[in-house]
Amino acid sequence: MKIRHRLALGIVSSLLTIFQADAQGSAGTDAAIESRYIIDYPTAGLIGHGSVAADFEFFEANGMLARVSLGAWDRLLLGISFGGSNIVGTGQPTWNKAPGIELRLRVIEENLVLPAMAIGFSSQGKETFISAMDRYTIKSPGLYAVASKNYQAMGFLSFHGGINYSMEHSDNDEDINLFGGVEKTLGPFASITAEYDLSMNDSNSGALGKGRGYLNFGLRCAVGNGLALGIVLKDVLRNQQDASLGNRVVQLEYVR
């Protein structure tokens, strides 16, 4: 058993070494791909012209969200997504009402003074789609504008901030919302992220939130060429009425 155990550890170690030898995902100081999302909300990051990104998110209630994005020219991103809950298991899957679409245009490139700035639209919310309320558990961004700035600080330190107006108004909350986040590299292959969504559009009497906003933390690791794996702890402030502390989500990203 000891020999088998050592052999298994050796194989895993070798595979990790092979992956990390050319890890070029969106995490760490060796990243060759811009971060396109803080956690739930977009950054000003894009993928290159002709590049394709596939993102998968696995969340509570056996849910999964799949997204495919295309880099059209050097300043435009187009995306489509679809998913649902109870996908794994014996019960009947509950699919989202419609596919989500995203369009993101970078209007200003980052320089020494100015951050990168992008405007866009995304109809894709997060977590389960609640048919009775005609909305996602976490509302879609809708129309948004976001700025991203990177600094060298024992690796890289990135700040993101934006404003958005969701099209999900079934709770009669049509307020404009603010969001922001920070990302810090941890060595060549890993990054940690923190995101705060003020949820100003999800805080009235008919909403799901308690008015505290959504605070999320994440760890993302580059595990191969264009491949990154993320683990996210969501809604730490327990803003959702029936959310438990530490809603755990797994994210997988592949860019080619």
Image (tube, rainbow, N blue to C red):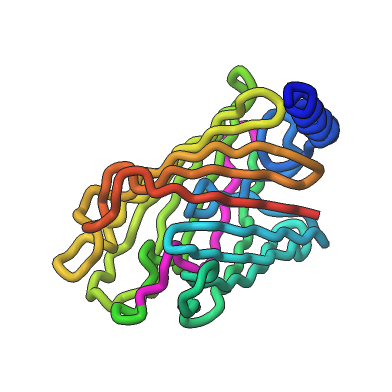
Q: Is residue 122 magenta?
A: yes
Left or right relative to 20: residue 129:
left
Quadrant of res 167: bottom left
Boundaries of the magenta span: 111-130
Quadrant of res 35: top right
- Residue 160 against residue 256 in the figure, above or below: above
Q: Is residue 63 visible?
A: yes
The location of residue 166, given as percent across then percent down, is 39, 68
Q: Is residue 159 visible?
A: no
Q: Is residue 209 magenta?
A: no
Q: Quadrant of the C terminus?
A: bottom right
- Residue 91 against residue 148 in the figure, above or below: below
| Residue occupying image coordinates x 70% and y 60% | 54
Q: Is residue 238 or residue 169 the one in the foreground?
A: 238
Q: Is residue 248 or residue 140 the one in the foreground?
A: 248
| Residue occupying image coordinates x 61% and y 66% | 66
Dominant SS in magenta = strand
Which residue is most to the left?
A: 205
Which residue is most to the front?
A: 1
The location of residue 216, given as percent across then percent down, is 41, 44
Which residue is most to the top?
A: 154
| Residue occupying image coordinates x 28% and y 70% | 174
Left or right relative to 115: residue 24:
right
Q: Quadrant of the N terminus?
A: top right
